[in-house]
Amino acid sequence: MKRTISNGVAGVCVSISFLFLVYSGSVCADSILKDQVNIRSGPSMKSEVSFRAPLGYPIKIEKVQGDWVYFCDWENNRGWVHKPLVSKVKTAVILVTEANLRSSGSTKSKVVAIAKRGEIYKVLTTKGEWIQLGYFFGGDPVGWVRSDLVFTG
């Protein structure tokens, strides 16, 4: 007796396979592990230093080549960093001149702090379009911000 797979089951299998391929080759968000890390023009210690990144600097990894990571940042700068200098700690940088940090994830909640453009925070949790930010060390909560006001990599 010949067996056939229904369109629904086949579709699920194709979808799962596609998601696996996309996820395994996709970009991921990380951050810089130490302060004033050299970001280079190529994947080598001999490559020119393009700029220096501070501790917690959020990056979107685009590819990995050996012990080097190629990334994009919040200002669309790209560069290479030595892989041991990349952390899995998820961080966010403020994109706007000033962002209200609120007591909860709602524009109706109380403003508890004002964050300035370029400030870096640790991402504690997300809820819908809201992100709870905390201090990098200790992780004490600071407040909630809309996700469109920050870059998380």
Image (cartoon, helix red, strand yellow):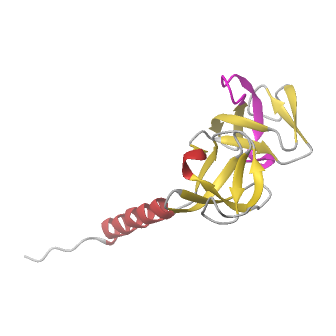
Using the image as rendered, state which of residue 151 and residue 85 is in the foreground. 85
Magenta span includes 69: no
Rendered location of residue 112, percent (x, y) = 85, 24
User: Where is the N terminus found, in terms of image quarters?
Assistant: bottom left
Residue farthest to the front, as pictured: 46
Residue farthest to the bottom, as pictured: 2
- Dividing the picture into quadrants, the one containing residue 103 is top right
- Dividing the picture into quadrants, the one containing residue 141 is top right
100 lies above or below 95: above
Q: How many marks?
A: 0
Rendered location of residue 76, percent (x, y) = 77, 61
- Dividing the picture into quadrants, the one containing residue 122 is top right
Residue in view at x 81 percent, y 46 percent: 149
Instruction: Please give left or right for residue 76 compared with residue 71 in the image.
Output: right
Rendered location of residue 96, percent (x, y) = 88, 47
**Extent of the magenta region:** 134-153
Instruction: Please give left or right for residue 92 compared with residue 149 in the image.
Output: left
Rendered location of residue 13, percent (x, y) = 34, 65
100 lies above or below 32: above
Instruction: Please give left or right for residue 88 compared with residue 135 in the image.
Output: left
Residue farthest to the left, as pictured: 1
Taking the image as drawn, is residue 153 in sight? no
Using the image as rendered, state which of residue 62 and residue 48 is in the foreground. 48
Taking the image as drawn, is residue 132 in sight? yes
Magenta span includes 150: yes
Residue in view at x 75 percent, y 32 percent: 144
Instruction: Please give left or right for residue 87 compared with residue 105 in the image.
Output: left
